[in-house]
Image: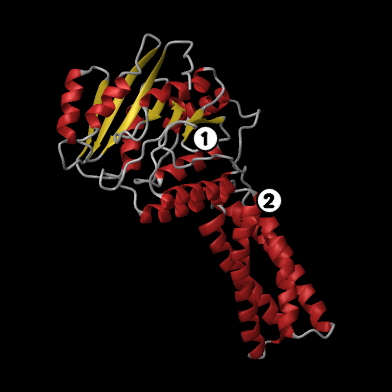
Amino acid sequence: MKDLEIKKAVKLTVVIPCYNEERTLQECVRKVLEIEDKDLSLEIIIVDDGSEDGSLQIAQSLESQYPQIVLVHHDKNRGKGAALRTGFQSATGEFVAIQDADLEYNPMELKNLLVPLINNEAEVVLGSRFLSAGAHRVLYFWHYLGNRFLTFVSNMFTDLNLTDMETCYKVFRREIIQSIEIKENRFGFEPEIVAKIAQMRLRIYEMGISYRGRTYEEGKKIVAIDGIRALYCIFHYNAAKAPLPIQFLIYLFIGGFSALANIVIFLILFALGLGINVSTAAAFILAAIINYLLCISLLFRHKARWNSVTELLMYFVVVCLVGILDFFSTKLLFAMGVSPLLAKSGGCIFGLIFNFLGRRYFVFPETPSGPWKPQVNSNRTMRRMRVK
């Protein structure tokens, strides 16, 4: 594929996280330096993440040879996410790219990824290993399947249509990446950063790239536990702003558990002889407390919009309205000759739906994730970031 041309001079910061990459680091840096020309100046930030081989010494030698290189060293290994966090903080280029030190990706393709950014068509560009017709080394089937599965689940939560969420090649406007608080220290960085750029409603592009994967014998570091962590990160960083169908599915678990608690507490109190009125009201109140705690722990972000007093007041209003519905629907069904268990179950079904709608739109209102929207233009977004 013919390389696209960069039409104006720009500065690109390339962050290279490095942990025990003595075999490939020097060649990687050489290939990155080759993309520099009269229209593209480079800043290369090598973050040695506590390497135990000769990587640090190689990086120090490279820094002394090339003025474009800045070396940062972690005393102990913290993980890829931590290394990138350090590198992003030091970046000074207009744009910032990630380059692994293992030579699985071709640095020359960064020029192509820069074009939508330079033309002001995007704030973030991702290189997809699954869009390209170029050369791809044939390796692990289950890794491929895992990548596609994680991308699929991530897309469900972010409402994006990416093909390669786990790709290394992500290029950002510097203001964007420096405004994002990165919490993940290892490979959870990938789903975390995708979640956060989706929530910012940025203009995101994908472009096909080639890929030369490596085996574990050649130094590949990602393991099965990282896939499990990725699933956790997709849920953790996206749930509060996920599309409505996904949030409702999550709430089915929360509401279902709360409804089960409601029924069990009701039956216990009713069996103790407290009567239909007292048993129904007491069970509902206790279940509402359980529901609230699960909501702020798993689904909705605590204090998403309100201060704590207003949030609790709004929650109390919703609970009261749904409680009235629960109370009278249970009594009505019981008066119609339905058994206590079925009467209470019917009230819980109505409560489940209205509980979710009340919490989603009144107690914990959030702007959902998704593609870029015209009213959120890049200039206004960047001004807001600088204020922070």
72 sits left or right of 244 in the view: left
Q: Is residue 96 left or right of residue 314?
A: left
Within-10-Å neighbours for mark 2: few <14, some 14–19, many 20+: few
Disc 1 crowd rating (10 Å Cα; few below 14, some 14-19, many 20+) is some
The answer to whether 144 is drawn above or below residue 279 in the figure is above
Viewer-nearest residue: 300 or 312: 300
Let me know if residue 307 appears in the view.
Answer: no
Residue 68 x/y as whole percent: 27, 18
How far apart in space, not on screen, are marks 2 and 1 (Cα)? 38 Å
* Residue type, mark 1 in image: Leu
Q: Where is residue 94 in the image (x, y as percent from the top left)?
A: 42, 20
Residue 71: name its quadrant: top left
Q: Which of 203 and 287 is in front in this view?
A: 203
> Can you identify the residue that label 1 sits on?
131
Q: Give me the residue at 46% from left, 45% from top.
A: 191
Q: Mark 2 points at which residue?
A: 361
The answer to whether residue 279 is left or right of residue 49 is right
**Residue 266 screen position, x and y as percent:** 65, 81
